[in-house]
Each structure stands twice: as structure tokens, then as C-alpha cells.
């Protein structure tokens, strides 16, 4: 009788180990996929953070768009406008144009949530289009970074703005939680 629990545990361990070994064997037989191209990697990261911000812009209730956690902070709408507007510090220099004068449009320029959503979508789509237009070779081109006035690779500048957008995404998650809401990315997947 004392051997039965031990035997059962051993059989269970063996049964669980077989699928793991079979999976490892399958991985050895499958050819390794080549790395994605440099421009695809940048574009995928750009599109991922923009997808999250656009989902928030579309999802957050319009009557809460002017919510601020504290008076000193930007409102939800101002956060979106800033994140989207700042992309033109990437887009414009890459296109050989001057960066914008302001960090983003002012809230009073937009009368509705729909107008803000449209602007956010356009700003991130413009960034994606610039990345696509440059392609792999263009990711290594040097341009002058608008804030430091230093030469940087286009890919490095893109990653800086991807990170910046990600920081604002994180801040907007807090706005959701303080409003008693669950951000789209944190909801159970269907």
C-alpha cells in the first residue's frame, strides 16, 4: 500500500514528460524562421503601441475625456493628443520637414471624442507610412534628432518615440483604473 502513491506519482510524471519530449523533438525537426527585417521589427513595435493607444481612444467614455488624476496633470484627451502629436517630431524630420512648433495640438481644437480618435489614428498611421517608405536600408539613414540636434539613425529615433508612446500608454492605464475602468489590453481575451 505504501508503494501505490509513489507509483501513481511516478506514472503521472512520466505521462506529463512524454508530451514535453515530443514537443522538443518537433522543434528540432522544424526549420528555424529567419529574423524579421529591420524595418518590419520597427514597424511592428510602432503598430503595437499605436494599436493600444487607439483602442483606448476609442474605448474610454467621452464624458471622462477631460478627467485628470490631479490638477497638474494632463487630461485623458490631452495625453492622447500629446502622444499622437509628438509622433510628428519623428515623421517630419524623416520626411525632411521641420518638426512641429508645439508638442501636440491643444484640447480646444477638438470638439469631440471622434475628432480626437481620428487625429490619433492619423498621427500613428503617418508614422507607420514613413517607416514603410524608408524600408530596411532607410532605417540606417542618419537624420538630426530635433531635441538634441545630434545625428541619429532613423530606427533609433523611431524607437525613442515608440518608448515615449508606451510611457503615455502606461499613464493612461492609471487613468482607466482611477476611473473604475479596465483598460482594453487588460480585459480577458475572447
Image (cartoon, rainbow, N blue to C red):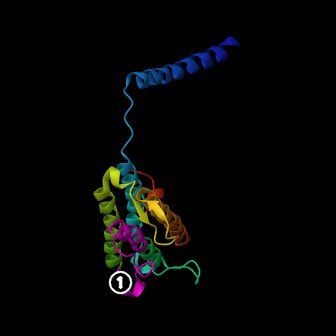
The residue stretch that appears in magenta: 85-112
Residue bearing mark 1 = 110
188 lies above or below 83: above
Is residue 121 shown above or below 77? above
Mark 1: which secondary structure?
loop
Q: Residue at x 35, y 64 (%)?
A: 127
Please say whether residue 1 is visible from this viewpoint: no
Residue located 59% across and 80% down the image? 70
Instruction: Where is residue 25? Give x, y as percent.
Output: 44, 20
Residue 83 in the image, given as x and y percentages of width and height:
44, 71
Q: Residue furthest right?
A: 2
Which residue: 28% across, 58% down?
Answer: 133
Q: Nearer the viewer, residue 131 or 168?
A: 131
The residue at the point 42 percent across, 84 percent down is: 106
Above or below, 160 against 118 in this view is above
Query: Can residue 41 be seen by looking at this rendering?
Result: yes
Above or below for 22 versus 123 = above
Amino acid at each position: 500500500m505504501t508503494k501505490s502513491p509513489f507509483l501513481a506519482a511516478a506514472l503521472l510524471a512520466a505521462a506529463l514528460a512524454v508530451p514535453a519530449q515530443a514537443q522538443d523533438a518537433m522543434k528540432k525537426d522544424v526549420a528555424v524562421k529567419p529574423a524579421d527585417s529591420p524595418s518590419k521589427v520597427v514597424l511592428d513595435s510602432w503598430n503595437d503601441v499605436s494599436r493600444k493607444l487607439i483602442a483606448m481612444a476609442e474605448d474610454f467614455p467621452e464624458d471622462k475625456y477631460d478627467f485628470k488624476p490631479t490638477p497638474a496633470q494632463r487630461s485623458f484627451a490631452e495625453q492622447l493628443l500629446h502622444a499622437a502629436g509628438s509622433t510628428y517630431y519623428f515623421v517630419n524630420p524623416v520626411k525632411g520637414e521641420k518638426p512641429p512648433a508645439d508638442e501636440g495640438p491643444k484640447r480646444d481644437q477638438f470638439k469631440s471624442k471622434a475628432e480626437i480618435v481620428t487625429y490619433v489614428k492619423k498621427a500613428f498611421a503617418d508614422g507607420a507610412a514613413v517607416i514603410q517608405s524608408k524600408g530596411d536600408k532607410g532605417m540606417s539613414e542618419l537624420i538630426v534628432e530635433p531635441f538634441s540636434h545630434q545625428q541619429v539613425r532613423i530606427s533609433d529615433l523611431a524607437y525613442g518615440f515608440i518608448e515615449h508612446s508606451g510611457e503615455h500608454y502606461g499613464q493612461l492605464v492609471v487613468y482607466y483604473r482611477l476611473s473604475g475602468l479596465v483598460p482594453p489590453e487588460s480585459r480577458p481575451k475572447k
